[in-house]
Image: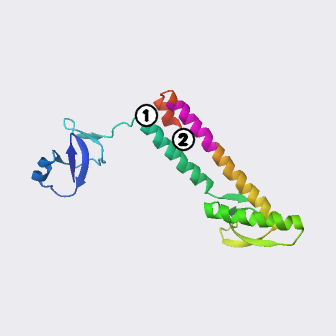
Amino acid sequence: MFVILKNNVVVGMVDGQPDGGDLETRGEVAVEVLDATPSLGDIYDPLGMTFSTPELSLDDLTQAKRLELMTAANAAIEAGITHNVLGADHVYPTKRDDQNNLSALSLKAERVDRLGEAWAARFWCADAADVWMRRVHTAAQIIDLGETVMLHVQSQQDHYEIRLAELASAALQGDRAGVEAVVW
């Protein structure tokens, strides 16, 4: 593999020998790489023939951490919950569509519950054998499940908010190690 360098920064990679004439006109050079796996943007040290990844600025690192935390928060929210509303533990999905469907069912369940009407709905869950199916839930069970999912989402958002505050504090103090230390 050959890396294409401009001012000792990796700007491309090719499998075969590149055309040297084209490289020269763009101010680039090609270096054959045998024992390294460089990435775009890495810096090449011609004396040691090594590659290193440049350090992000504190602002860029903070932004990357913010994105990492947001991704982790969304994954935690959508990971599902375990609840025993049916009398035994079942796993319930909590992806956005699942939350929306449960919200609609919860509204209906609250209305029929207030009116004292008999009502049931089927909602997805997995039993202890990991068999997924839409199981029948009463209005009271749907209301309970909806509240539990809401608490789960709020708990994950609270955790996310705390981590963002830690990140902002470390960044404001210019504490690079503190920014790097913030994890989900």
Which residue appears farthest toward the right when viewing the image? 116
**Magenta segment main secondary structure:** helix
Chain-order first, disc 1 or disc 2: 1
State the residue position of label 2. 183
Res. 142 image quadrant: bottom right
Question: Tag 1: Cα neighbours inside 10 Å, few (<14), some, or many (≥20)?
Answer: some
Provide the residue designation for mark 1: 58
Q: Nearer the viewer, residue 83 or 141?
A: 141
Q: Circle 2 sits in a helix, a strand or a loop, which is it? A: loop
Determine if the magenta segment contains residue 74: no
Looking at the rendered structure, the kind of residue marked 1 is Leu
Q: x%, y% of residue 107?
A: 77, 63
Residue drawn at 76 percent across, 63 percent down: 106
Q: Quadrant of the C terminus?
A: top right
- State the image coordinates of residue 145 (x, y, percent, origin top left): 75, 60
Answer whether residue 162 is magenta in the image. yes
